[in-house]
Amino acid sequence: MSINRKKSENLTRFALSGLSNMCGATTTNPIDVIKIRMQLDNELGARHGSKNIFKNRYYNGFNLNGGIRILKEEGVRGLYKGLFPSLLRESSYSTIRLGAYEPLKVALGATDPAHTPLWKKITSGAISGTIGSAIATPTDLVKVRFQAVGPGKESRYRNTFHAFATILRQEGVRGLWTGVGPTVQRAAILTATQIPSYDHTKHTLINNHIMKEGPPLHVVSSFTAGFVTACTTSPVDVVKTRVMNQAKDNLGRPTVYKNSLDCILKIMKHEGVFGLYKGFIPNWMRIGPHTVVTFFVFEQLRKFVGMRPV
């Protein structure tokens, strides 16, 4: 393959990666809003003195109850809060993490997609996820802060661009990267789990002649990847949400959590181990469909432009 053709294929892969992830984000934004609200609900046992995190919750129950409550109190728009910064995030973070995955595999010596060692897939995913999230943290920060605004609360920002300007003015450049630690940690774990799980499940099924290349295989592989990813990322996702959403004092210092470790320790102390898995069901219900939509669209777009499957 010539250098120009290889560059063109890589650029196409990046573009298709961003587009497919944006489709997934649009589909699952309502679930993302519910997940954020549940992760912040009764933060550090604010409504009671015990570690019973299932007691006196505002968004009681799982996805359905939370969704109905948001729909009643905030309308359909409430379920689509943070959509624009979410799309900005996917167009940057996810473009890099999914687009760079295959070139990184090749750089590690994986020339045969059907027989690539799992460790090379995991390593490639961790690296691409880390790079993408480190760059795109500001878009993730704004998304979380918009989605966290519940009924009766006034948003700190008029719109996405006002949010970027306000954070820059009040918190400085570093403020735009608030929560970059847990964000990068989550992205590294997520990408090292999600894409390799899809890739490995798919080729395992093909190599053992259980399924053949096509949409049914893409759905089964992506569903499996979504569940595995939800299990590995839920704790760090809760930490990321808490750190990003917390207020800061006049000097720009965080008012609740000093860092990721401090957040984990406080959650464990006030809410117990299950506090780290708040919002697990909506997290799974978001990551699952997001993964299915993303990889299904990604594979179909690759077929449309003449690229070989993942």
Image: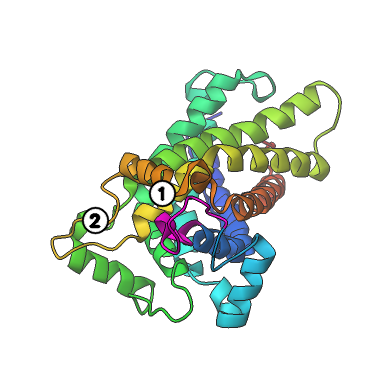
Mark positioned earlier in the residue sequence (1 or 2): 2
Whether residue 252 is situated above or below residue 8 in the rendered picture: below
* Crowd class of label 1 (few under 14; some 14 to 19; many from 20; radius 10 Å): some
Q: Is residue 134 left or right of residue 60?
A: left
Which image quarter holds the C terminus? top right
The residue identified by callout 1 is 270
The answer to if 40 sits in the magenta stretch is: yes
Residue 98 bears which disc, if any?
none
Residue 76 visible to the viewer: yes
Residue that appears at 38% across and 80% down: 154
Disc 1 marks a residue whose amino acid type is: His
Whether residue 29 is situated above or below residue 261 in the rendered picture: below
Chain part drawn in magenta: 39-54
Q: Does dot 2 land on a helix, a strand or a loop?
A: loop
Residue that appears at 54% across and 51% down: 278
The residue identified by callout 2 is 254
